[in-house]
């Protein structure tokens, strides 16, 4: 397998696996049905109307979730390309990636999206918006996301 095919394979597998597990984590954290979570994801693109979009909007949310997850995996691989020793230490790299992903999603992606919910852009605001428990749960979910990508990418390149 060529290096490009191997990299593409890692991106797809890591993105699908991490994105799907992240969706399950969001359902558990929010005690919500997957369709509700998928509508919330789709709202990042189409706004408030996602709540009433039915299964087609849920499918859009799933495609967006997987696309974003694959993009994150590709960025991780790009950053790690010149640091194979860090890629092999996938646990520490994955944890760090998860923390960065959490910050980028909450401080950049969601605020710039069409989603009707926007967490305040301070730690206090996030704690107040999420509640301390949900804030920690969401951070741990993103760390798990980073660990999955780190694990999948550990031998690539």
Image: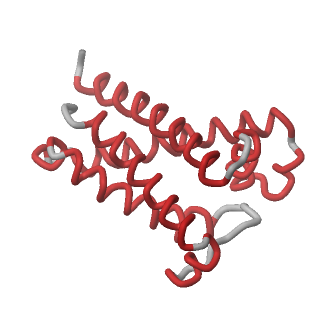
Q: Nearer the viewer, residue 94 or 12?
A: 94
Q: x, y percentage for residue 63? A: 63, 36
**Residue drawn where x is 56% and y is 77% of the image:** 127
Residue farthest toward the left in the current orientation of the protein = 85
Q: x, y percentage for residue 145? A: 42, 46
Q: x, y percentage for residue 88? A: 15, 41
**In the rendered image of this protein, does residue 123 appear above or below residue 3?**
below
Q: Nearer the viewer, residue 145 or 11?
A: 145
**Quadrant of the image occupied by residue 13:** top left
What is the quadrant of the C terminus in the image? Answer: top left
**In the rendered image of this protein, does residue 48 appear above or below residue 151?**
below
Residue farthest toward the top in the current orientation of the protein = 1
**Is 81 on the left-hand or right-hand side of 129?**
left
**Residue drawn where x is 30% and y is 55% of the image:** 95
**Residue drawn where x is 60% and y is 53% of the image:** 29
Q: x, y percentage for residue 146? A: 36, 49
**In the rendered image of this protein, does residue 137 appear above or below residue 121?**
above
Q: How is the image coloured?
A: secondary structure
What is the quadrant of the N terminus in the image? Answer: top left
Count of numbered marks: 0
């Amino acid at each position: 397998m060529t290096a490009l095919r191997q990299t593409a394979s890692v991106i797809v597998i890591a993105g699908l696996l991490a994105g799907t597990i992240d969706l399950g984590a969001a359902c558990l954290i929010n005690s919500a049905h997957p369709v509700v979570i998928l509508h919330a994801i789709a709202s990042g693109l189409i706004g408030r109307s996602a709540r009433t979009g039915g299964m087609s909007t849920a499918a859009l949310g799933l495609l967006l979730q997987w696309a974003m997850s694959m993009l994150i995996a590709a960025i991780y691989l790009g950053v790690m390309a010149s640091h194979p020793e860090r890629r092999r230490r996938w646990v520490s790299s994955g944890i760090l990636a998860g923390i960065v992903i959490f910050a980028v999603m909450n401080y950049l992606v969601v605020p710039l999206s069409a989603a009707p919910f926007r967490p305040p852009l301070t730690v206090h605001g996030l704690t107040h918006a999420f509640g301390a428990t949900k804030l920690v749960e969401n951070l741990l979910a993103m760390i798990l996301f980073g660990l999955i990508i780190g694990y999948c990418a550990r031998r690539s390149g």
